[in-house]
Image (cartoon, grey):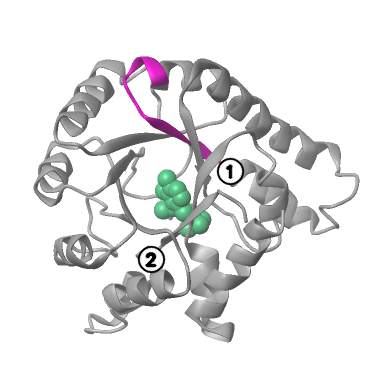
Amino acid sequence: MSDIRLCINIDHIATLRQARGAAYPDPLEGARLCEEAGAHGITVHLREDRRHIQDRDVYGLKEMVRGTFNLEMALSDDIIAVAKKVVPSQVTLVPEKRQELTTEGGLDVAGNFSRIRSAARQFRDIGVGVSLFIEPERDAVYRSREAGADYIELHTGAYCSEADEWGGDLGGTLPPRVQAELDRIYRAAEYAAEIGIGVNAGHGLNHYNLKPVLSARDLHELNIGHSVVSRSIFIGLAAAVQELLAIIGGR
Ligand code: PXP
């Protein structure tokens, strides 16, 4: 059995609901199915524009999620206020731009250091774990620990894009561009372990590109969303979750 935990990001269940302004599909129902299928937790991103997850979803999830409830959020006073009312198990601070399709790039920890440190302190004071979504770079890892975060979440997006574009056998020799992105993740995880900050990872992961990431040192938790919700259209949500759990368990 692997000790790497899998949290499912269910934002895009809400995306489908919001596309019609309907009452379905219900993200809470999705969360229940994911946890019943063996997921260790649920992640949602409460965006400032509320394009998918709504405040009522977050309060509902807080009541029903049995495992880790990880709330992704920007460093905005409004969202911080909601998060402090909800008290999830963990917050993951992410950069957020209105026009982006999804989170692009990691947090600029150096450029926002005092705001991040202040937010981290506020959350830790109420018993909420703090993770920072960062590029797999040494300086960002170091500054995250200095800012008082419990975890970093390594942005796997660049690796996933390279791997998906290539599409070959990830168990063999990798093209230099894919290997270079993977090595950035490995090096950042190695350094995090050395300086004593926990490591999560996510963004762009799917059942094809996941396996090599599992070799990152002391990986604690994965956050996977878009690919799971996409795959659930064809094989069902429980099967999509179990497929990832099997890959994690078989590493
Ligand atoms: N981790 C973070 C910090 C994210 O912002 C996202 C996207 O919301 C994810 C993980 C999940 O990424 P994906 O939907 O590509 O699996």
- Residue underneath mark 1: 156
Query: Left or right of 208: which side holds 5?
Result: left
> Is residue 146 one of those drawn in magenta?
yes
Q: Position of residue 95 (x, y in %)?
A: 36, 37
- Note whether ligand 1 is within 8 Å of mark 2: no
Who's the residue at 58% across and 43% down the image?
Answer: 156
Q: Are marks 2 and 1 in contact (CB under 8 Å)?
A: no
User: CA separation, marks 2 and 1?
Assistant: 18 Å
At x 62%, y 56%, the residue is 1
Q: Amino acid at mark 2?
A: Ile
Residue 180 falls in which quadrant of the image? Answer: top right
Q: Is residue 9 left or right of residue 246?
A: left
Query: What span is colored magenta in the figure?
Result: 145-156
Query: Residue 189's image quarter?
Result: top right
Which of the labelled discs sits on residue 3, or is there none?
Answer: none
State the image coordinates of residue 179 (x, y, percent, origin top left).
Answer: 79, 38
Q: How many marks?
A: 2
Q: Secondary structure at mark 1?
A: loop
The kind of secondary structure element at disc 2 is loop
User: Which residue is the site of mark 2?
Assistant: 10
Q: Is residue 102 visible?
A: no
Q: Nearer the viewer, residue 193 or 170?
A: 193
Say whether residue 240 is magenta.
no
In the image, is residue 83 above or below residue 207? above
